[in-house]
Image (spheres, coloured by chain):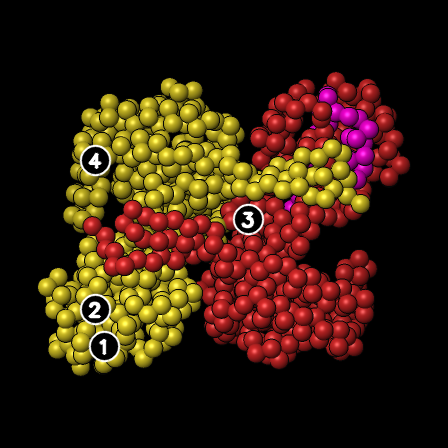
Chain colours: A red, B yellow
Amino acid sequence: MTDLQDMGKRAVSAKYKLQTMTADEKNHTLLTAANQLITHTEEILKANEQDIAAAEANGMHPGLIDRLRLTPERIEAMAEGLKQIAALPDPIGEIMEQFERPNGLQIEKRRVPMGVIGIIYESRPNVTADAFGLCFKAGNAVILKGGSDALQSNMAITGVLRSSLEEMGVPEDALQLIMDTDRSITAAFMKLNEYVDLLIPRGGAGLIRSVVENSTIPVIETGTGNCHIYVDKDADLTMAVNIIINAKTQRIGVCNACESLVIHEDIRESFLPVLAKALKAHKVEMRGDEKVREFIPGCHTALEEDYGKEYLDYIISMKTVGCVEEAIAHINQYNTGHSESIITENKEAAEKFLKSVDAACVYVNASTRFTDGFEFGFGAEIGISTQKLHARGPMGLRELTSYKYMITGNGQIRG
Amino acid sequence: MTDLQDMGKRAVSAKYKLQTMTADEKNHTLLTAANQLITHTEEILKANEQDIAAAEANGMHPGLIDRLRLTPERIEAMAEGLKQIAALPDPIGEIMEQFERPNGLQIEKRRVPMGVIGIIYESRPNVTADAFGLCFKAGNAVILKGGSDALQSNMAITGVLRSSLEEMGVPEDALQLIMDTDRSITAAFMKLNEYVDLLIPRGGAGLIRSVVENSTIPVIETGTGNCHIYVDKDADLTMAVNIIINAKTQRIGVCNACESLVIHEDIRESFLPVLAKALKAHKVEMRGDEKVREFIPGCHTALEEDYGKEYLDYIISMKTVGCVEEAIAHINQYNTGHSESIITENKEAAEKFLKSVDAACVYVNASTRFTDGFEFGFGAEIGISTQKLHARGPMGLRELTSYKYMITGNGQIRG
């Protein structure tokens, strides 16, 4: 049985060293780790074969097996990911604010590592290197709990990464993997708040809900996206069709894909037949309210539950409204705080939408698919936060940091 | 039985209105509320008398009764607090960042309200007006759960505040009080994450632990402070005594009071007798390790558990170390992430301490008592965060906000 207390203590001990490492030291370590992954490709593939064989024997869904499978190219991509992280600016040490108080105290607010980060994820071995790289660059020790089906792969990858740490004189406990596959260990991990400062679940809605409900460690909720596009009466309709097709079909299984359309009723006649044709051409099933169905023959009926659903599939729900305020109210009722877009040439409607829609990312005349750390220029992404505490929207390196106040005086006491 | 679901829905409905209010509208509302508190002084005092009578009948500790008791002066102070909050700058709407992507997308990161904030606190009726004022100014709806012993007082205060909101055309559900005193209601409140974005416990260690362990809403942990002062071998010893006496005795029951001393062994002979004399004069009981006790006759023995204890009393623990690194390690082992200070004239030691001690506020040559929103110039304080997620150290208005990305395009789709 894994001794989580011991792992926690080791992580804390490693974090003190990481907090004092320079950007150069961290970058060299990441590059070494990247090279070692390539060097040990065969060993990692062998471990992965064991996972694949077991998964096939257990009848795992082919889509999941694909996510589990490693190839030389995928290992190269993992290494490339670490190199890209090494090339990013180091967020640590940044002076975020600086001020002097009337009593002469000099106060600096400085960016520091979060400390120890826990990541719980599904059977995707590439996340192992990626999560390590991001946490490490931001000066954090990390404890990983990956899906059991990827255990051999994860052990091989973390083995290589830990050797690289040791080779560079960095405490290898900067990266630890929980190797126990018993479910009770995950439950206990979520209560390790004495040592772990932040827990990030990466995976489907079920995993995230379980972590939010059971963790006593502060959590960042990521991922669920019931994203809307509202087509206003003053929309450029060609642009609207392009954006909807992109947001719905460019990649269907992702959290920033569009799941639901809200349409101003004044443009039903001019817009819906064109839209329907384009969606049909992309094999998207439509589910609309009565006013939608009047103009789209064969459109299915949207039930109440459709509006709250993240399909992650070739299905889209459609709802008509009489004004932008009604669109905003509908979106605020059903969205998951991820990404929402308005298509309009009307500045007033756009501003109202930007101000009043409650979501991490609110767009005017653009696809919701841009909610992404790379697309935002962060150079990396650990996830998309759908909560409001700490980080909202795409999370890059900075979002894996905290701050502290450094105060310098010359004998000040409080009166 | 309180219908928490209904309260949650009302709070969400109110938050949409609050998010669009201007600073002027919010300030006028706060000033109106302040005046109404004064106008209704008698009514509030009558309600408070009921609480006091019940508390006395139940044999409540006189110290707690004092915290529970309202007077015309205390109600005036509550009103004054609201006026001060009205005078603070409005954090909402601030453009925190602004950048353009190569594809032409314009991205703005804007400060927005958190949404709905829950506050769980003990039987201190002054917190009711204070917590409302801070949350409201930052554009948030708030649901309060105060200590049962203060229920009549809290009902009277929230009644006055809600009438003020209505008078100013603001949804009165911007402020709601849970009036049920059943313990199960508090447990259910902590699971209301569908509606509540942030939960802040204000009170003793037991209350905070219970919230951290049971809440599924994101929590900010506040308050516990096992604060250290390290007296380095290169310290100005007169300054050290002044700072220690201030940090230990100026107010003993607060989280930024000093609970433990770490002392470089080279200065034992010159420093300890002087320190001991000053501490004795302030009736502070000393508990030290063997090397301390050699130089302080009558000093009690510090047990292992003393080093981890927040006394909130006229007691201090003392530990000797051989170097600054050992001091840092000791503090990092026992502190609660609150406030730690080094007294030294040695720049190198000071820098090492600032960088390596893991706490919200790290001081050089100043009293730990300065960890406070007012002392930091924030103009207000909802608490001192001892966690690393979202906010660390003193929390003012800005720490009660979130942000969102507003992205403007002209038809961009993802390739």
Task: Give the mark toward the camera: 2 or 4.
Answer: 2
Q: Amino acid at mark 2?
A: Leu
| Residue at 44% over, 50% down | A97
Q: Are marks 1 and 4 in contact (CB under 8 Å)?
A: no
Do marks 1 and 3 share a chain?
A: no
Residue matched to label 4: B74
Residue matched to label 3: A391
The dot on residue B237 is 2
Which element carries disc 2, helix, strand or loop?
helix
User: Which stretch did the figure color magenta?
Assistant: A222-246
Residue farthest left in this picture: B281
Do marks 3 and 4 share a chain?
A: no
Do marks 1 and 4 share a chain?
A: yes
Tell me: residue B294, above or below residue A157. below
**Earlier-in-chain disc, 2 versus 1:** 2
Task: Give the mark toward the camera: 3 or 2.
Answer: 2
**Earlier-in-chain disc, 2 versus 4:** 4
Query: Does the magenta segment cover residue B166?
Result: no
Circle 4 packing at 10 Å, graded few (<14), some (14-19), many (20+), is some
Q: Are marks 2 and 1 in contact (CB under 8 Å)?
A: yes
